[in-house]
Amino acid sequence: MNNNKIYTLAIESSCDDTSAAVLLNDKVLSNVVAGQPIHEQYGGVVPELASRAHQQNIVPVVDVALKKAGITKEQLNCIAFTQGPGLMGSLLVGGSFAKSMSMALEIPLIAINHMKAHILAHFIDEEGYDKPEFPFLALTISGGHTQIVQVNSFFDMKIIGETTDDAVGEAFDKSAKILGLPYPGGPLIDKYANEGNPKAFPFTKPKVDGLNFSFSGLKTQILYFVQKQVKENPNFIEENRNDICASIQHTIINILMDKLTKAVEETGINRIAIGGGVSANSGIRKTLKEAENKYGWKTHIPKFEYTTDNAAMIGIVGYYNYLEQNFSEANVVSKARIEF
Ligand code: KG4
Ligand code: ZN
């Protein structure tokens, strides 16, 4: 076996993005993502439609990923795929495809935990990108997850804080919905927040023990606040959109920063790496960058394409597992919920 040149094909299909990537060792040769605009009109991901769209997308997406990488499938050394967590119907499409391909090509199959992949995306080799040193704290924030994870090595990590209800991305998207903005509303809140006053409408932060989060109370608070204001002034949202968005974003960032600060205090680890779609948020990026000077933290913010759901992050974990010969059996099952 030639360990100097390992080609990994990775497949990610946990939610509403069909993605395939090819890596040569820890470098990404291609990372193709096909989104599913069909869900926009429903204001959220419809599992049955997601599964069907994955079935339509998977073959062309893998084909393009191989072509972009400039290799043939016969050159592949292993196939990594997302085992879970995610939507069952979506996971099954990527999982079945990966299994068939590994059997046909007679190469190892490697099942990957999607949440660990969001964290280890930081180890994709990119020119100019400073990889985090172990141990570090990972803040994983997306539409489906909100976690603080202590990462001791590639294979040793533990969740030290997580949401007890909504994920932070849901807090953004549900708040946006209250304001009449289309799904997913997170990026729009970010955009309007840049023009607004973050202190215009002070929302209260939830009281949650330890390093855990809660976002459902904030959503209810925003709903009641907006309903009350609109009763008094039907144009309240239009007239104050930027300030409302800035205030919501400010509150969410404060909630995240409070818990991160506490996690740094408790663990004594001040290296922070973020991942997940919400880490695209300009306010969060700015606040974390400022924390380097303000608190002496070292913060790691990956390239945007590696923060949202993508197969390259599955590929990097696949590659490290390949080096350890951590292979999966052909009967490995996809799991909507999966132990960390
Ligand atoms: O990781 P991701 O692409 O998919 C999963 O949920 O796994 O994350 C999508 C989430 C959505 O909730 C979206 O509104 C949010 O990330 N998001 C943002 C921004 N860009 C994406 N939230 C706030 N500000 C942004 N700029
Ligand atoms: Zn994700």
Image (tube, rainbow, N blue to C red):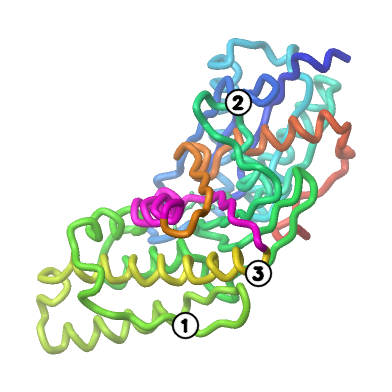
Q: Is residue 111 above or below residue 44?
A: above
Q: Is residue 41 visible?
A: no
Earlier sequence position, callout 2 versus callout 3:
2
User: Considering the image in quadrants, where does the C terminus appear?
Assistant: bottom right
Q: Residue at x 74, y 60 (%)?
A: 158
Label 2 Cα neighbours within 10 Å, binned few <14 / some 14-19 / many ≥20: many
Residue 98 falls in image quadrant: top right
Of badges 3 and 1, the one in the foreground is 3
Range covered by the magenta-colored residues: 268-293
Tell me if the residue at label 1 has its CB under 8 Å from ligand 1: no
Q: Residue type at mark 3: give it.
A: Glu
Horizontal and vertical percent position of residue 235: 10, 76
Q: Residue type at mark 1: give it.
A: Pro
Is 252 part of what is drawn in magenta?
no
Front residue of this view, candidates 204 and 136: 136
The residue indicated by pointer 1 is 206
Horizontal and vertical percent position of residue 24: 67, 19
User: Considering the image in quadrants, where does the N terminus appear?
Assistant: top right
Q: Residue at x 17, y 83 (%)?
A: 230
Q: Secondary structure at mark 2?
A: helix
Q: Secondary structure at mark 1?
A: loop
Q: Is residue 246 above or below residue 286?
A: below
Q: Is residue 108 above or below residue 338?
A: above
**C-alpha separation, residue under disc 3 versus residue under disc 1:** 20 Å
Of badges 2 and 3, the one in the foreground is 3
The residue indicated by pointer 2 is 62
Q: Residue at x 41, y 65 (%)?
A: 253
Q: From the viewer's perspective, is 330 left or right of 239?
A: right
Q: Which mark is residue 266?
A: 3
Q: Residue type at mark 2: give it.
A: Val
Label 1 Cα neighbours within 10 Å, binned few <14 / some 14-19 / many ≥20: few
Q: Is residue 162 visible?
A: yes
